Amino acid sequence: MNATELAVGCRGLYKEFGDGDSKVQVLRGVDLSVALGEMAFLVGPSGSGKTTLLSVIAGLLDKTSGDLQVLGQRLDELSPQAQVRFRRHHLGFVFQQYHLLPALTAAENAAVPLLAAGIERHQAFARARDLLDELGMGARSHALPSHLSGGEQQRVAIARALIHEPYLVLCDEPTAALDAETGHEVMALLCDTARRPDRAVLVVTHDNRIFEFADRIAFMDDGVITGVKAQADRKTPEHRPIAPA
């Protein structure tokens, strides 16, 4: 697989925190690739370095050493401002803790990437409401995060990640706060994104209910990738409207 076919390419990736006697090595030579058109899962025990790796790939943390390319771009060659622009235009994020802005409604939170890209407010909010409706949140689009359940907040976070049609979506436990049926439908939306020839999704998860949707599963332990399993028989879920929250 050549570099032009990769959404993510990690080779010998290290990440350390602290100095001297307090130094902790979280990533210890990670080799991982995610192809365009692929939904890849990253699984492993808590503390194995999965979320750290996701944050390094996103450019939210700097690597200590090794080679990292995201959508053909070496992030360490970009200025901090250029990295922000790269993330804004090309990446979507689903964080484990949602990170919704408390003073904004569900629709306003979902519309943030479009507003940051300069899209007219009425267009951005219309697209946000449509996507929230797809996620079963149409009746809750005017609610503040403090009035939403954990599962509802997760749906808003997923809408925010997908609304600008990013080339790479990075998800940290996207179905953890969702019931099985809703998790299945969320995976359908993510599959719609992943299985396009110029796009990809990387999912960190402990949820074995959704393993069947992965094209490949990378297993991580103690800061390294210990194996990768390809799933030729992976499931392509039928996409149906998600039930209202």
Image: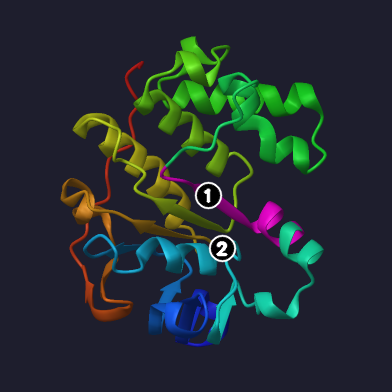
Q: Quadrant of the N terminus?
A: bottom left
- Check disc 2 and report the residue beneath it: 58
The magenta segment is 85-96
- Residue 92 on the magenta segment: yes
The answer to whether residue 22 is above or below residue 211 is below
Numbered badge on residue 26: none
- Where does the image place residue 235, in percent across and percent down from the top left? 22, 53
- Where does the image place residue 228, in percent across and percent down from the top left? 25, 77
The answer to whether residue 129 is above or below residue 28 is above
Residue in the image at 23% along x and 30% along y: 179
- Check disc 1 and report the residue beneath it: 93
- Residue 238 on the magenta segment: no
- Position of 15 with respect to 114 (left or right) is left
The foreground one among 104 and 166 is: 104
Q: Name the image quarter holding residue 60.
A: bottom right
State the CA–CA distance, disc 2 to disc 1.
8 Å
Element marked by disc 1? strand
- Where does the image place residue 90, in percent across and percent down from the top left? 65, 58
Residue in the image at 76% along x and 35% along y: 115
- Where does the image place residue 164, in percent across and percent down from the top left? 64, 43
Residue in the image at 34% along x and 57% along y: 204
Residue 241 appears in the figure: no
